[in-house]
Amino acid sequence: SENDHKRKRDEQEIASPPAMDGNDAAPEPTIADMKCMLDETRIRMRVMQSEINIIKTVGCPANDQLSQFKMNRLQRDIDFMKKCNTLRDSTFDELEERCHNLEEKNKNLEEKNEFLESRCDSLERSLQLLIKKQKWKYSAPSVPSSHWERRGFDEEEIYSMENFIVQLEDETFALRRGVDRIDISIHEENYTTTLLHDGILLPHWKEFADALQLYPHSLIDPDIGSKFSICYVQLTSGVIDLLTPALKVKDFETIELEGNGFVTILEGVDFAVEFVKSNPGLGEFVWTNNAMGSMDNVNRLLQALKRLPLFRSIGLNNCCGDSVNGYDMLLSLIGGKKHLEEISLSSNNIRTAGGTHLSAYLATNPRLETLSLANNHLDDNDATLIAEALRQNTSLEYLSLDRNAITDIGWGALRNAIFDPTTLNSVFDSNHTCRVYGLDLHTDHMGDPKDNRRRKMHLLLSSRHKDEVNAFHLDQEVGDGDGGNDYSLKLVPMVLQCVHLSSEIGYRQHLRQNEERRMHFAQESNDCVTPLSVTYEIIRSWKMPELFEHHGTSS
């Protein structure tokens, strides 16, 4: 029959596909082709199964060999198609996996190719400069004070411009000499007002850009690192055109761009994105007092940063304005797979509107060590949620929440998260790692978290010592337990050892902190007593008679 003939032909094709030469070879099926083949096979199987069901439903005489033959043939066809279907399924999965791997490989190759093209362009420009200027000297003309006077500058502004030109010259000569570190810092001296560009500065910018272009990055000491910073100096299109090619493939560890007065927002963001992409070794990026303009620009910059393998620290301060939701920018930073060590988003109009993403993120104890959200619109609810998260967090070391809409309620919650003096257990369960800027505590964290915890315990014991109530509280907190009085008596030596150790270390920490604050210990002697005083009070009044009585009975 026609079906038998077709089945045998399919079996032969699968078992031994026809040989083809290189010109006649059929192309490998695509994923779309495989999907169509699978769908067709499934349809044929459903049709055949329907025929079998019809024959079974209508019924046939036991001696009706023709009907039985048809059923057997259809069943064989279904079994064969199942085998084909299984084979095609596995082939389809293999094709999908191969396509995914090829896409990843192609993406990596494109990135490497882009990086190599940038390096080649950089080397070519360096070679051209070396050919042109084999005997170099600083050729930018000096700018007389009269030029700035004609521009209407006052004495302070003239001084700032002249000082800026000196900075450019110094950095240029340093690069030409081949120093073993790059700490390029071009800035307005007082970091207050952006120095506006003047066309007469372009020759100085060109000398600086040429020196940067020729500087071999291999001279940098890896233990020192490299930094590039331009703060409160305007970067116009002409200056950006000079700097962009010179900054490629330099592998700066830190980039700071602050208050640069870009002519357009897009031009500034494009410069930053290009700068980031061409520095694969970048670890820290700061962008302050430069507008972002839109969330699309923010995402472009963050996407470029997140692709860097060593990137760990970001500062995007006062860059949102009214056009970007600062909270969305925060979520973009904490929501990805890239876990940062430092995040600074001060002055970005951040409002959570009751959102819990930040506190939930902190409660997971990520690797984040520094978080600055100063001068935003966080409220008491946000502070309370963050305080609860801090009880689960042992990584965050510095948190800045000053100049927000947080009242005494929110600060109180944060204070209790850092130091809850209710009981010894509440002290133990407090956060001993994070220092919250703006909290007026005598327990500012310094050094080892264990030492911070001991200092807090000593402060609690010292405060109780004023009224000589340590024994009373120890009875309440240690208690007799399930094992009766014998149980608490067995704990006495361990409690005394813990109290003495905490008091010794806590007292030293307290003295050191007072030294750092340049305060005399006598001014705070009522807040922190000597370890011996605390230990003596407890020995004198807590379970000593019972302990000796128990010891006598046991012996």
Image (tube, rainbow, N blue to C red):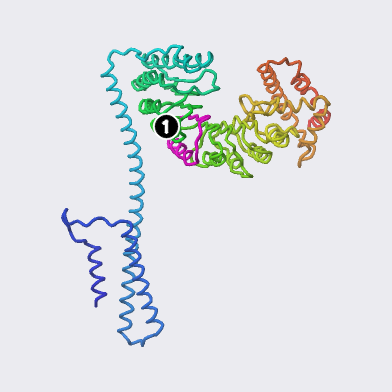
Q: Who is closer to the viewer here, 48 or 537? A: 48
Q: Residue at x 68, y 22 (%)?
A: 505
Q: For the residue carrying disc 1, how many other residues have a C-alpha within 10 Å: few (<14), some (14-19), or many (20+)?
A: some
Percent of width and height locating residue 237: 40, 29
Q: Which of 373/2 is in front?
A: 373
Q: Nearer the viewer, residue 10 or 538?
A: 10
**Residue 526 placed where, x, y %?**
78, 21
Q: Quadrant of the N terminus?
A: bottom left
**Image: magenta residue range:** 283-308
Quadrant where the image shows the C terminus: top right
Of 328 and 251, the residue lying toward us: 328
Q: Secondary structure at mark 1?
A: helix
- When the figure is inspected, residue 388 is found, relative to residue 232, above or below; the finding is below
In the picture provided, is 173 more to the left or to the right than 319? left
Residue 471 is covered by the magenta coloring:
no
In this view, 18 is above or below 43:
above
Left or right of 550 in this view: 307: left
In magenta segment, residue 296: yes
Residue 215 image position (x, y, % from top left): 35, 20
Q: Position of residue 394 (x, y in %)?
A: 60, 34
Residue at left 79%, top 22%? Answer: 536
Question: Which residue is depicted at the point 40% across and 25% down?
Answer: 239
Residue 476, by quadrant, is top right
Q: Which residue is mark 1?
A: 271
